[in-house]
């Protein structure tokens, strides 16, 4: 059933206090020993096995989580090439089927599927049987409109239960899901959806954010007008205005069906690599990259990540009874996909729709913490910037309700500074002491992870039984053959290098939509598409470092995956990410290509040219300056600054409004006309000018002196601010 008010907590079904369970990764290792006689002296040995004996490791993940297929697979990794690896040929899976297989057991144990709340205080609980019924009803509705395998279903939805239902309904039909958040403007959404030519659209009439109702009917009308392939539109009524939209079907009506066809509906069995969804990751030029992931890869990797590394178990299992998993995200961030994947293991997902920091007039960084206290959250995740904002606001978590059930704090999106982690640890020590426990004996576990939209997973993350060091991540993920490479392509330890992954992972993209070699069909894509190759595989020569366990392989194996992060792997296996090695903007966990921002800013008549850099570095607050070259006579006054910020807010999202806007005479460009984003970023992060830019390759090297002076002043201001910032206990 679905309730709309907070139900009284059932004490028998309530989660226990912090860290009550045997760690999931220990259970897996015990299973490996009992089933296969495998025992490892330490995590490093286990990890080494997982990235060397790929067939045995990934088969163990399939078996351990009990994945089902009506037909057997003929191999695990049939072809070890990057890109284009062939996983589990012959197997059939379905993402929705994997989630719904838990419905009966979870419901019998009294565990809901989804708990949600929004800024208006509307609280809902969706039971597993009701989730299954709504998924079936919506799937049958879409199928009746002609939606079938391979068709794209686009969504313009916030983080509400309807979005998860729509994802599962789409997946159950073999159609391909793609979602954008309603805080994105029309231009940014169309840049994505135009590329994939959706047949159906599931949208919202409006949202409430930061204390304001935001009508999105105008955006919906623009989307419908600009997407000629749309044949059907379903609207979720959030603000009570959906009834005024002509030619659309009300979501409530589309999911109201409850008959024999609904009861007997089953998701289709699909090939292991059948496309599941399209997500978007932007580079520095061109349109956002439409990245296609497959059903089987996402199921395998999500179960591995959620269970073994995030230590999140089924809510109905005795070892993890009452698990409640919350990771604050918008639908425009890949962490929404990660949150939804909790359903794959039968875990209750706890979601919030709204501003986690309150409104502009009434800032309130306790919003999510009170929500977590009232719903019994056991795993609390958010972007690193969220925790930093809580600390800077002087928030007292003990005043936000009973948070003693939280046993783990998850972070990603940007590096988490040691100061913020120490602040959170001290807060939870006090919370546990007040709850009657020994707050100092067992610190709250920080599950700091780093991965990406690109492969919808994590390369580096947590391990509940390994030591914690503030500012560092505990380990490289099982199955992720991650190394830091120097400029010569050699693995380095305890030194900063390029993050590479030398072996394939099942969740790596199938291809980019519409990306194909010359002469090939334009759609849907190809694993050897030029854009896909250029995004991850063009830095190092094919075969270099590709042999499992180390060493070079034949060129036919392809190149290693180069991720675009600076990484240091310590001698103990702990890792530090030092921000992006490319120029993609990463604001509060949402990545956006600089080209999208330039289109918005340079549409203003006063702006001739622009350059933006996102200064994200461990231990410093992220800072994003925008440099603008203006037409003669134009002045960067308050009015123009407001119009520039407004253009970015409207076209992209408020998240991408810069921290400062600076007028410059010129934007540095190469001889081929490319903006010098990465050299300026490195300069502003403190690297010497002569090491970051080749003047001979520039069209206008005379402008560099100004940027060098600006960098000197910026670094001095940053150092002074850090020195003046008081430590918080």
Image (cartoon, rainbow, N blue to C red):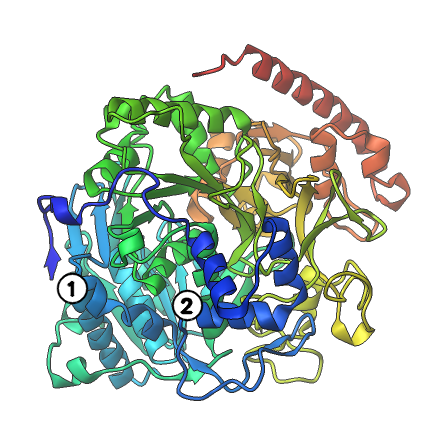
Seen from the viewer's position, the closer of residues 39 and 244 is: 39
Residue 356 horizontal side relative to residue 711, left or right = left
- Where, quadrant-wise, is the C terminus in this rendering? top left
Q: Is residue 560 above or below residue 43?
A: below
Badge 1, how many Cα within 10 Å: few under 14, some, many 20+?
Answer: few
Residue 613 place in picture, x, y as percent? 63, 38
Callout 1 secondary element: helix
Residue 137 place in picture, x, y as percent? 20, 76
> Residue at left 27%, top 68%?
102
Mark-to-mark CA distance, 2 and 1: 20 Å
Give residue 396's quadrant in the image.
top left
Residue 527 horizontal side relative to residue 394, left or right = right
Q: Which residue, given by chain and number where applicable, does mark 2 sit on?
A: 65
Give residue 125's quadrant in the image.
bottom left
Q: Which is more N-terminal, label 1 or label 2?
A: 2
Q: Which residue, given by chain and number where applicable, does mark 1 sit on?
A: 108
Seen from the viewer's position, the closer of residues 63 and 215 is: 63
**Looking at the image, which residue sits at the far right?**
696
Badge 2, how many Cα within 10 Å: few under 14, some, many 20+?
Answer: some
Callout 2 secondary element: loop
Q: Is residue 439 above or below residue 168?
A: above
Residue 478 place in picture, x, y as percent? 57, 57
Q: Is residue 373 above or below residue 717?
A: below
Q: Is residue 666 visible?
A: no
């Amino acid at each position: 059933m679905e309730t709309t008010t907070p139900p009284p907590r059932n004490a028998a079904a309530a989660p226990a206090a912090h860290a009550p369970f045997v760690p999931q990764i220990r259970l897996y290792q015990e299973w490996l020993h009992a089933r296969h006689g495998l025992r490892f002296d330490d995590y490093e040995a286990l990890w080494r096995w997982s990235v060397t004996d790929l067939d045995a490791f990934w088969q163990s993940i399939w078996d351990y989580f009990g994945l089902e297929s009506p037909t057997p697979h003929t191999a695990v990794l049939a072809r070890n090439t990057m890109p284009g690896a062939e996983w589990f040929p012959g197997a059939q899976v379905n993402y929705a089927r994997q989630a719904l297989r838990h419905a009966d057991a979870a419901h019998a144990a009294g565990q809901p599927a989804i708990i949600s709340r929004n800024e208006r205080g509307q609280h809902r609980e969706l039971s597993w049987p009701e989730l299954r019924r709504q998924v079936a009803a919506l799937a049958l509705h879409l199928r009746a409109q002609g939606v079938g395998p391979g068709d794209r279903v686009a969504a313009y939805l916030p983080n509400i239960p309807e979005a998860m239902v729509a994802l599962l309904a789409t997946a159950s039909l073999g159609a391909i899901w793609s979602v954008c958040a309603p805080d994105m403007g029309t231009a940014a959404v169309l840049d994505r959806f135009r590329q994939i030519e959706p047949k159906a659209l599931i949208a919202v009439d409006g949202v409430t954010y930061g204390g304001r109702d935001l009508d999105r009917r105008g955006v919906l009308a623009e989307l419908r007008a600009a997407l000629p392939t749309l044949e059907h539109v379903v609207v979720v009524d959030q603000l009570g205005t959906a009834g005024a939209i002509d030619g659309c079907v009300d979501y409530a009506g589309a999911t109201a069906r409850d008959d024999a066809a609904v009861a007997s509906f089953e998701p289709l069995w699909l090939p292991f690599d059948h496309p599941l969804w399209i997500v978007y990751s932007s580079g520095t030029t061109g349109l956002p990259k439409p990245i296609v992931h497959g059903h089987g890869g996402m199921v395998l990797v999500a179960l591995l990540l959620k269970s073994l590394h995030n230590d999140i178990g089924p809510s109905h299992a005795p070892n993890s009874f009452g698990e409640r998993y919350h990771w604050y995200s918008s639908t425009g961030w890949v962490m929404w996909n990660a949150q939804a994947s909790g359903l794959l293991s039968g875990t209750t997902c706890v979601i919030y729709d709204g501003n986690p920091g309150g409104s502009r007039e009434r800032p309130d960084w306790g919003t999510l913490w009170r929500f977590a206290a009232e719903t019994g959250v056991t795993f609390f995740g958010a972007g690193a910037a969220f925790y930093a904002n809580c600390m800077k606001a002087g928030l007292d978590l003990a005043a936000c309700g009973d948070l003693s059930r939280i046993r783990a704090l998850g972070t990603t999106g940007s590096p988490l500074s040691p100061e913020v982690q120490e602040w959170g640890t001290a807060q939870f020590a006090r919370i546990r002491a007040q709850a009657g426990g020994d707050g100092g004996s067992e610190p709250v576990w920080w599950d700091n992870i780093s991965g990406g939209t690109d492969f919808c997973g994590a390369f580096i993350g947590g391990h509940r039984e390994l030591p914690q060091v503030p500012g560092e991540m505990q380990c490289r993920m099982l199955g992720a053959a991650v190394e830091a490479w120097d400029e010569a392509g050699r693995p380095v330890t305890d030194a900063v290098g390029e993050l590479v992954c030398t072996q394939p992972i099942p969740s790596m993209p199938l291809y980019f939509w519409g990306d194909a070699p010359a002469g090939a069909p334009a759609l849907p894509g190809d694993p050897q598409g030029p854009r896909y190759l250029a995004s991850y595989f063009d830095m190092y020569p094919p075969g270099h470092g590709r042999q499992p366990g180390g060493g070079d392989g034949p060129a036919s194996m392809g190149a290693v995956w180069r991720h675009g992060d600076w990484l240091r792997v310590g001698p103990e296996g702990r890792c530090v990410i030092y921000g992006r090695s490319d120029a993609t903007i990463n604001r509060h966990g949402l990545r956006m290509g600089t080209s999208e921002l330039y289109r918005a800013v340079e549409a203003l008549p006063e702006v001739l040219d622009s350059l933006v850099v996102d200064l994200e570095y461990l231990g410093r607050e992220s800072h994003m300056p925008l440099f603008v070259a203006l037409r003669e006579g134009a002045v960067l006054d308050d009015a123009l600054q407001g119009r520039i910020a407004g253009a970015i807010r409207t076209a992209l999202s408020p998240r991408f409004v810069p921290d400062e806007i600076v007028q410059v005479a010129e934007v540095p460009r190469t001889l081929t006309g490319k903006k010098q984003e990465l050299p300026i970023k490195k300069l502003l992060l403190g690297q010497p000018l002569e090491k970051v830019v080749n003047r001979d390759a520039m069209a206008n090297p005379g402008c560099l002196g100004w940027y060098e002076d600006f960098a000197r002043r910026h670094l001095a201001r940053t150092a002074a601010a850090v020195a003046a910032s008081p430590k918080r206990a």
